[in-house]
Image (cartoon, rainbow, N blue to C red):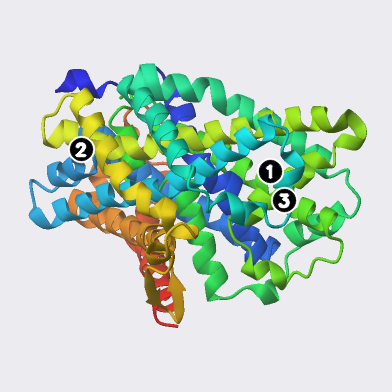
């Protein structure tokens, strides 16, 4: 049903939509948290290395698979392998992974909705207290916000590729970038922010260990939407007259820039509000770090613009973060919808409704995992710790599976589809690619180094999370 698939209207539309899928909670929430708990600059340097030399080639491979086949991950693996059932299963993992990531992503986005309501009602000072986050995530009223959020997500998805996904990204992504840069400059003027700046930009390589390496690669994959099937699906909407290497480079630069500025905002803010911050204590930080410290940043503005002015700016910023999260959530949920349309021959409307029901079913226990239900709060035990349902989904599908899916993409591209097929697709719309040094690096790295690195990180992550 080609009329249901659609495509992006231009290269800019693809770049903004792909960046919108990448730029979200992975950058604004997860990246600062991961940087804080993994040594600051040591983590940042590894992250940038992985973006340039590991993630960029995998991004091009995923987008090429999608554009070549005009299919979702299941269809792409199946088509390029002539219907091989084993590779079709690999494609199914590319559908299951974004679905489950959407589950915990939805919960975090619901928290953002609650914060927006609290700020609008004059509660910025309450959100700045240490106990606020724990109280918010255990409210029964979260279910009402969950329904509200999912209604927005699926109304956007009913609009299709151009009318829903692309239109959303074109407006919101540039606005978010401007607000983030302006807020970062404000934070850097605060007393003692320089201590956080040093922690973030001056590397201490003694902090480098397997955990930091694993965290940096997992974060790079998550923030660029790799291993989730998103770029395969978005590649299927990509115009064959445009250059994949050039467009991919712009997506990676936009995504990495937002992540960098998010870290530049959060880590100096931590030290500005607590000059006695012990860097060792940051190793235990979590997503709650963002929800605790960002309100304090805005509350500090009241000396200059008053409490009302600070609340207005906080509301605008959290609105933009919410929309960044929304663009990512919409992108993630689009992947299984694309599969239902391609493989089950559903109309877009029926596919959206099916996905709405499934996501609601799984998002409810995840919402109950932080105090609302003892069963889901203490859902599993592994690695010597008790984990909630929310933690389990995060550990399995964010920390663990993404590098493995990337590994399967590399092996598939190099040894089943063949590097000649990848090169031929990347040359379409880019006359300079064939015979270039970039082509030689992509072919060499995808066929040798990258799958080895990804498999090693996958094995190391499994051992550290589940068996330590």
Residue 158, image x, y percentages: 31, 22
| Along the line of sight, the residue nearer the viewer: 253 or 151 | 151
Label 2: element kind: helix
Q: Residues within 10 Å of mark 2 (few under 14, many from 20)?
A: many
Front label number (2 vs 1): 2
Front label number (1 vs 3): 3
The numbered disc on residue 339 is: 2
What is the CA distance from the residue labelled 1 to the residue labelled 3?
Answer: 16 Å
Residue drawn at the location 80% of the way across and 32% of the way down: 310
The numbered disc on residue 446 is: none
Q: Residues within 10 Å of mark 1 (few under 14, many from 20)?
A: many
Q: Is residue 168 left or right of residue 447?
A: right
Q: Which quadrant of the figure contains the N terminus? A: top left
The numbered disc on residue 293 is: 3
Does 163 sit above or below residue 19? above
Q: Is residue 430 left or right of residue 171?
A: left
Query: Label 3 near label 2: C-beta < 8 Å?
Result: no
Residue 49, image x, y percentages: 56, 57
Q: Which quadrant of the figure contains the C terminus? A: bottom left
Q: Is residue 303 shown to the viewer in this render?
A: yes
| Along the line of sight, the residue nearer the viewer: 192 or 452 | 192
Residue drawn at the location 17% of the way across and 21% of the way down: 2
| Along the line of sight, the residue nearer the viewer: 222 or 11 | 222
Snapshot quadrant of residue 412:
bottom left
What is the CA distance from the residue labelled 2 to the residue labelled 3?
Answer: 39 Å
Does 459 sit above or below residue 269? below
Dot 2 or dot 1: first in sequence order is 1
Dot 2 or dot 3: first in sequence order is 3
Does 241 sit above or below residue 285? above
Dot 1 or dot 3: first in sequence order is 1
The residue to which callout 1 is attached is 261
Residue drawn at the location 34% of the way across and 33% of the way down: 234
């Amino acid at each position: 049903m080609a009329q249901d698939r659609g495509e992006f209207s231009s290269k800019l539309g693809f770049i903004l939509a792909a960046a919108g899928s990448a730029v979200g909670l992975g950058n604004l929430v997860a990246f600062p948290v991961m940087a804080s708990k993994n040594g600051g600059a040591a983590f940042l340097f590894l992250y940038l290395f992985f973006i340039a030399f590991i993630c960029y080639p995998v991004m091009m491979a995923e987008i090429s698979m999608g554009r070549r086949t005009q299919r979702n991950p299941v269809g792409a693996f199946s088509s390029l392998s002539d219907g091989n059932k084993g590779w079709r299963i690999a494609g199914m993992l590319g559908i299951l992974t974004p679905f489950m990531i959407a589950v915990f992503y939805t919960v975090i986005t619901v928290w953002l909705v609650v914060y927006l309501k609290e700020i609008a009602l004059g509660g910025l000072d309450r959100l700045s207290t240490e106990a606020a986050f724990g109280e918010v995530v255990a409210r029964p009223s979260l279910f009402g916000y969950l329904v509200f959020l999912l209604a927005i997500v699926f109304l956007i998805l009913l609009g299709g590729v151009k009318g829903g996904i692309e239109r959303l990204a074109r407006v919101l992504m540039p606005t978010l970038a401007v607000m983030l840069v302006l807020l970062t400059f404000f934070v850097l003027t605060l007393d003692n922010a320089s201590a956080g700046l040093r922690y973030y930009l001056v590397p201490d390589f003694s902090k480098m260990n397997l955990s930091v390496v694993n965290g940096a690669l997992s974060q790079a994959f998550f923030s660029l939407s790799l291993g989730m099937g998103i770029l395969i699906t978005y590649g299927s909407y990509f115009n064959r007259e445009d250059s994949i290497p050039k467009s991919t480079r712009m997506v990676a630069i936009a995504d990495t820039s937002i992540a960098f500025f998010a870290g530049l905002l959060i880590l100096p803010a931590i030290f500005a509000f607590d000059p006695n911050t012990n860097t060792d204590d940051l190793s235990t930080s979590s997503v709650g770090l963002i929800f605790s410290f960002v309100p304090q940043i805005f509350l500090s503005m009241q000396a200059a613009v008053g409490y009302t002015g600070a609340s207005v700016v906080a509301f605008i910023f959290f609105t933009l973060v919410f929309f960044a999260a929304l663009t990512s959530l919409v992108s993630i949920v689009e992947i299984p919808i694309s599969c239902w349309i391609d493989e089950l021959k559903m109309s877009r409307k029926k596919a959206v409704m099916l996905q709405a029901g499934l996501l609601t079913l799984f998002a409810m226990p995840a919402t109950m995992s932080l105090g609302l239900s003892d069963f889901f709060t203490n859902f599993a035990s592994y690695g010597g710790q008790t984990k909630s349902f929310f933690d389990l989904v995060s550990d399995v599908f964010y920390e663990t599976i993404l590098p493995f899916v990337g590994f399967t993409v590399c092996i598939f591209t190099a040894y089943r589809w063949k590097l000649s097929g990848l090169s031929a697709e990347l040359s379409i719309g880019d006359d300079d690619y064939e015979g270039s040094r970039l082509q030689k690096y992509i072919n060499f790295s995808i066929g040798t180094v990258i799958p080895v690195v990804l498999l090693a990180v996958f094995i190391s992550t499994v051992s550290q999370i589940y068996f330590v």
